[in-house]
Image: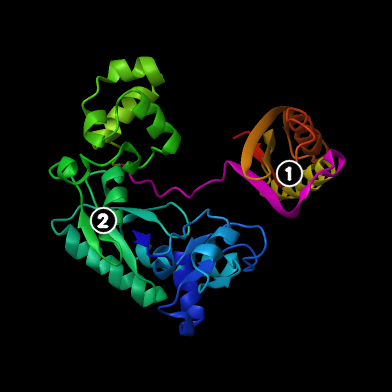
Amino acid sequence: MDLDQFIAAVEVLRHPELRGRPVVVGGDGDPTKRGVVSTASYEARKFGVHSGLPLRTAVRRCPDAVFLPVDADAYEAASAKVMSALRETHAVVEVLGWDEAFLGVETDDPEGFARDVQRRVREASDLDCSVGIGQNKLQAKLATEFGKPAGVYRLTGENWFDVLGDRTTDALWGIGSKTAKRLAGLGITTVRELAGTDPHVLAAELGPTTGPWLVGIARGRASAVVDSTPHVARSRSRETTFQENLQDWARVRAEVSKLANRVAGDVLAEGRPAARVVVKVRYAPFFTRTHGRALPAPTTDAHEIERGALAALELFIAGRPVRLLGVRAEFSR
């Protein structure tokens, strides 16, 4: 189950006058500031506005769009209604995030079950969703994209290559642009070509685990186990985008210290010790690097987390202008 244009849809429910207009949600809602798009309505997507796009670029592409600030509390509340409705189906529900979940169910009428899911979600939240049907989670996940908006689509081994065979490899869930480029460098550009590759050959190029796994997903193979165990965060992070580039590395250190202490507060509230700290630096104009350091021992101590963050910062090239900083603490378990 995948909620359609979720964040934008929640905002339209709150502001009915925006229905049918291009809506962009991101940052504090001011497109003249630095920040990125969290989501865009279908009307805005027609202009090339998408998640992760800088807000300043979004307003150039779609100057008539309505820009709104992110309101995480509202989205969490709407998501909770949806997930509660899904659990009432008595299927096994594995939550992926605010707007997605797998439902494990055996039925002779999957389309009928899917339409019942859509009805329940709409009654609970006034939101529309798309439902993908598959023999495993990979197939179901990809099927939702063919069902959008507010539709139902079945993708199984029978129609896998008819639907996906000639698409580029990054059409597969789990393959991003970097991996697709590496595959293209090996002469593998389509899902069909990847599926026909000898796993042992790809293992030699991309590793003994990654190579065969990529061939497997290209053949439509994946886990069919839906796990209702609540998600446990593996890390806590904080980041800040600066409206003016930081030129002074002493200021960069000070900002990393602030972020590290905020993260330490989150770690303490979680009640689980952090074992590693990772720092993210986005240089101007938009070049991102990360470095991490293992802590001497798992800890919730703010001083140790700050020290680890500053040690990781030392691995970066100082002196270049910085537009974004982030600190992530990874839990030991």
Whether residue 208 is visible: no
The quarter of the picture where the C terminus appears is: top right
Q: Residue at x 24, y 38 (%)?
A: 220
Q: Which residue is mark 1?
A: 322
Name the foreground residue: 55 vs 113.
Answer: 55
Start and end of the magenta stretch? 225-251
Viewer-side label of 2, 1: 1
User: Is residue 235 covered in magenta?
Assistant: yes
Q: Which residue is mark 2?
A: 146
Q: Is residue 82 above or below residue 310?
A: below
Question: Which image quarter: residue 284?
Answer: top right
The quarter of the picture where the N terminus appears is: bottom left
Q: Residue at x 26, y 52 (%)?
A: 143
Name the foreground residue: 174 vs 263.
Answer: 174
Q: Residue at x 53, y 53 (%)?
A: 52
Give the residue furthest to the bottom: 17
Q: Residue at x 33, y 30 (%)?
A: 214
Q: Position of residue 68 (x, y in %)?
A: 58, 71
Mark earlier in primary sequence (2, 1): 2
Question: Which image quarter: residue 297?
Answer: top right
Q: Which secondary structure lies at badge 2?
A: helix
| Identity, as a three-letter code, of the amino acid under mark 1 | Val
Give the residue furthest to the right: 250
In the displayed structure image, the side of residue 77 where residue 244 appears, left or right: right
Q: Is residue 208 above or below residue 109?
A: above
